[in-house]
Image: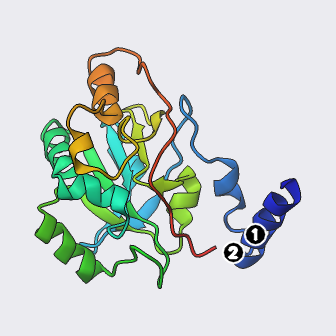
Amino acid sequence: MKMKRLSRFLRILLLTGGFLLPQLLQAGRVGQAAPDFTATASNGRSYHLSDYKGKFVVLEWHNNGCPYTRKHYESGNMQRLQKEWTARGVVWFTVISSAPGTQGYMTAAEENAYLAKMGAAPTAALLDPSGQLGHLYGAKTTPHMFIINPQGELIYDGAIDDRATTDLSDVNGATNYVSVALQEAMSGKPVSTPTTRPYGCSVKYGY
C-alpha cells in the first residue's frame, strides 16, 4: 500500500514537472493558514483568496453528476446555504475540479447555465479542470467543505452535514457542520467540530 501511494505521488510530480510539490506539501490544515490561490470562475473573472482577508470564505467542492451533490441541490439545501451566508457577508466559492472527460466537468457556459437552472447563488463558481486547487486543499469528495476565517486560517475541513446518504429527505434534521461552524466563528467562539470525514463521490481528478 505504501509503495502504491509513493508511486502515485511520483506520477503526479512527473506529470506536473514538480509544479505541485509546494502545494502538496502545504495542503491546508485546520488551525493553519489556508493555502492562497488564484482561480478563474465561470463568469470569466479571476479570484484571489488573498483579496478576501477580513471575510469568511467557504469552499464547496462540486460535481453535478454526483448523487451526493444532487441531494443538496435538488433539495435546495445548498442554494439556501449559499444565499443565507453570502447575505451575511461570507464569500462562497463553488469549486469544480473534475477533469475534462470525467463526471462533473463543466465548461464556463455549461456551469453558468447550471447555476441559473438551479437558482444557485455562490459568489462564483471556480473552474479547476487541472485539479491544482483541489490538490492544494486535499479535496477528496463532492461535496467537501472548507471554511477560512477573516485572518486567513482554515477553521473547518470536512462534510457538509452528518447524514452521509443520497436521500433528499435526510437534509431535514441533519446537523449542518458548515452552518454550525460559521455561527460559532462569527460569534467569536471556537469551532466545536473543526474536522469531520467528508462524504460523497470522489473528486474526478485527471491524475
| Whether label 2 touches label 1, CB < 8 Å | yes
Q: CA distance from mark 2 to mark 1?
A: 5 Å
**Looking at the rendered structure, which numbered label has been put on residue 16?**
2
Quadrant where the N terminus sits is bottom right
User: Residue 123: in sight, yes or no?
Assistant: no
Name the residue located 48 percent from the left edge and 55 percent from the top edge.
141
Task: Inspect the image, locate mark 1, and give the three-letter code of the amino acid beneath it.
Answer: Leu
**Depth check, front residue: 66 or 24:** 66
Foreground residue among 71 and 44? 71
Q: Residue at x 45, y 69 (%)?
A: 128
> Residue 206's image quarter?
bottom right
- On the image, the x and y values in percent for residue 114 come to 20, 72
Q: Quadrant of the C terminus?
A: bottom right
Residue at 40% of width from left, 77% of height from top? 105
**Is 207 displayed left or right of 4 in the figure?**
left
Residues packed near mark 2 inside 10 Å, few (<14), some (14 to 19) or many (20 plus)? some
Regarding mark 2 in the picture, which secondary structure is present there? helix
At label 2, the amino acid type is Thr
Judge whether 4 appears above or below 169 on screen: below
Give the residue at mark 1: 13
Residue sitting farthest toward the right = 3
User: Residue 23, position in %: x, y?
Assistant: 64, 56
